[in-house]
Image (tube, rainbow, N blue to C red):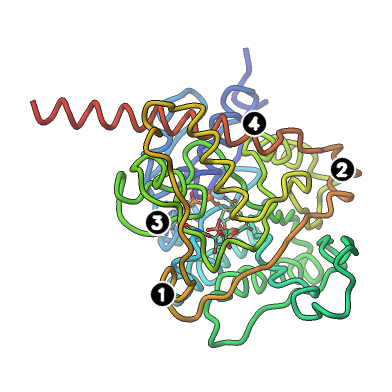
C-alpha cells in the first residue's frame, strides 16, 4: 500500500475544467499522487470528486489567501485557471486580462515564495499570426517551415490594440515573460506549456443545450449537429488548426510532471502537427462522422453556413491563420509524440457527446411526464 508520504503532492488550479478533469481522472487511475483540486465548479469531475487521494475545494482563484494555503501543502502546482474562449476576448477583455494575467500572477508569486514548482498553462495563441500572414507574397506557399512554431525562436505577432482578440494572447504572453524573469532572476522552478487546440469529451459546453454563449469551435459544431442547425464557418473557415486529442495531451503532461529536472525552465509546445485542417475541413469531417455515428439523428443532412467574424464575434476579432507546433524539443526532452489521428479523435469525442446528449434528452422527457 502507498503511504501518504510516498505520494507526489500536487495542487491543480482549474481542476474542474476540460483539461483539469482529464488530468485528475488520469492521475487518479495511474496512482502515486495526492491531489488538491481547486475550482469554482465540480460539474465535470462529479464522478470522481470523492475519490481517494483527491480533495476538491470550491475556491475562487481571486481568494488569494485560500489559494496560498493549499499551495503550501503540495510540491507542484499546475495552473490551469483562465477564461479561454475567443468569444470573450473582445467582449469582456478586462476579465480576460484579470483571469489570465493579474490573478494567476499571485499563484506564481506564491510558488516563488513557498519554493514550489509550477507547471503553467499558456497557449499556442501567444504565437499570434504567422509571418506568412503578413508576408503572403514573399514566402513561397510551399515553404512549410514558415508555419512551424518553435518555442525558443519563433516571433510572436499580435494585432493592434483595437483588435481585442489579442487580449488573451497578450495576457498569457506577459505572464510567460514574468515567469521566465522570475526563473532568471530569482530561481523559480517552472515549466510553461503551450497547448495547440486540444479536443475531446467534456470540452466547454453546448450552447442551446447546457447553457448559452459561444464556446470553442469543437463545441459550437457539436451543438449544431445535435440540434440539427448549420455549422457556422467564420469568414469561410479558411484558417487552419492542428487539433490534439486530449489523451495524448495528458500523456505529455504526466511526463512533464514526472520529469521535473529535464523540464525545468522550459517552454514546451504540446500539439499534433499531423492533424492540421482548415476549419471548413473540420466541419465536413464532423458532419461525415456524425452521419456515421448517429444515422437516424442526422437524416436531415447537416449543412454549413458562412458567417462574418463581425456577426459571429463582434468587432475587434482577428484570427491566427495557421499554427503548426514544432515538437522537436518535447520529443527530445521527454520522448513524447502524439499518436491519435484527427478522425479517431473526433470519432471518440462525437460518440461521447451523442451519449451525453441522449442522457440529457431522457432526463428532460422524465421531467415532462
Ligand atoms: P476550461 O475553461 O475548461 O477550464 C478552466 C477552469 O478554470 C474552469 O473549470 C473554470 O471554472 C476555472 N476557473 C475560471 N475562473 C476561475 C476562478 N476565478 N477561480 C477558480 N477557478 C476558475 O479551459 P481548458 O480548456 O481546460 O484550459 C485550461 C488551461 O489551458 C487554460 O489556462 C487555457 O488558457 C489553456 N489552454 C487550453 C487549450 C485547449 O485546447 N483546451 C489550448 C491552449 C491553452
Ligand atoms: C483557441 C482559444 O483561444 C484558446 O482556448 C486556446 O488557448 C487556443 O485556441 C489554443 O489552442 O492555443 P482558437 O483556435 O481560435 O483559439 O479557438 P476556436 O474557438 O477553437 O476557433 C478555431 C477556429 O474556428 C477560428 O478560426 C474560429 O474563427 C473558427 N470558428 C469557431 C468557426 O468557424 N465556427 C465556429 O462556430 C467557431
Q: Would you say the residues marked 1 and 2 are in contact, meaning their CB atoms lie under 8 Å apart?
A: no
Q: Which mark is residue 344?
A: 4
Q: Residue at the location (68% across, 40% down)?
A: 249
SS category of the residue bearing label 1: loop
Q: Residue at the location (13% across, 30% down)?
A: 367
> Does label 2 or label 3 sit earlier along the sequence?
3
> Does label 2 or label 4 sit earlier along the sequence?
2
Which residue is label 2 attached to? 331
Query: Position of 8 compared to 47: left or right?
Result: right
Which residue is label 1 attached to? 91
Query: Position of 134 compared to 107: left or right?
Result: right
> Does label 4 or label 3 sit earlier along the sequence?
3
Q: Nearer the viewer, mark 2 or mark 4?
A: 4
Measured in 3D between alpha carbons, the distance from the residue under mark 2 to the one under mark 4, in whole angstroms, is 22 Å
SS category of the residue bearing label 4: helix
Which residue is label 3 attached to? 60
SS category of the residue bearing label 2: helix
Within 8 Å: ligand 1 and the Cβ of disc 3?
yes
> Does label 1 or label 2 sit earlier along the sequence?
1
Within 8 Å: ligand 1 and the Cβ of disc 4?
no
Amino acid at each position: 500500500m502507498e503511504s501518504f508520504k510516498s505520494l507526489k503532492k500536487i495542487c491543480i488550479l482549474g481542476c474542474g475544467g476540460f483539461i483539469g478533469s482529464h488530468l485528475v481522472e488520469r492521475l487518479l487511475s495511474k496512482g502515486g499522487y495526492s491531489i488538491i483540486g481547486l475550482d469554482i465548479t465540480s460539474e465535470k469531475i462529479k464522478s470522481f470528486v470523492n475519490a481517494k487521494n483527491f480533495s476538491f475545494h470550491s475556491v475562487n482563484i481571486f481568494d488569494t489567501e485560500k489559494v496560498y494555503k493549499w499551495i503550501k501543502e503540495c510540491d507542484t502546482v499546475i495552473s490551469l485557471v483562465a477564461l479561454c474562449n475567443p468569444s470573450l476576448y473582445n467582449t469582456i477583455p478586462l476579465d480576460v486580462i484579470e483571469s489570465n494575467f493579474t490573478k494567476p500572477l499571485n499563484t506564481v508569486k506564491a510558488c516563488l515564495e513557498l519554493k514550489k514548482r509550477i507547471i503553467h498553462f499558456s497557449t499556442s495563441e501567444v504565437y499570434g499570426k504567422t509571418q506568412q500572414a503578413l508576408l503572403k507574397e514573399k514566402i513561397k506557399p510551399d515553404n512549410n517551415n514558415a508555419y512551424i512554431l518553435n518555442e525558443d525562436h519563433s516571433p510572436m505577432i499580435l494585432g493592434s490594440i483595437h483588435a481585442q482578440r489579442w487580449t488573451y494572447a497578450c495576457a498569457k504572453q506577459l505572464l510567460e515573460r514574468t515567469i521566465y524573469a522570475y526563473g532568471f532572476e530569482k530561481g523559480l522552478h517552472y515549466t510553461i506549456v503551450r497547448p495547440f487546440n486540444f479536443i475531446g469529451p467534456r470540452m466547454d459546453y453546448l450552447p442551446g443545450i447546457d447553457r448559452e454563449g459561444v464556446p470553442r469551435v469543437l463545441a459550437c459544431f457539436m451543438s449544431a449537429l445535435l440540434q440539427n442547425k448549420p455549422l457556422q464557418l467564420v469568414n469561410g473557415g479558411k484558417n487552419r488548426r492542428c487539433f490534439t486529442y486530449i489523451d495524448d495531451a495528458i500523456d505529455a503532461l504526466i511526463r512533464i510532471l514526472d520529469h521535473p529536472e529535464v523540464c525545468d525552465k522550459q517552454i514546451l509546445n504540446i500539439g499534433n502537427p499531423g492533424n492540421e485542417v482548415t476549419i471548413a475541413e473540420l466541419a465536413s469531417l464532423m458532419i461525415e462522422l456524425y452521419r456515421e455515428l448517429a444515422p437516424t439523428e442526422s437524416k436531415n443532412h447537416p449543412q454549413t453556413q458562412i458567417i462574418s467574424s463581425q456577426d459571429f464575434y463582434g468587432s475587434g476579432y482577428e484570427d491566427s491563420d495557421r499554427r503548426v507546433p514544432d515538437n522537436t524539443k518535447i520529443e527530445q526532452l521527454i520522448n513524447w509524440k502524439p499518436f491519435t489521428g484527427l478522425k479517431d479523435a473526433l470519432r471518440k469525442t462525437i460518440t461521447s457527446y451523442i451519449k451525453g446528449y441522449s442522457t440529457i434528452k431522457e432526463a428532460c422527457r422524465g421531467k415532462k411526464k
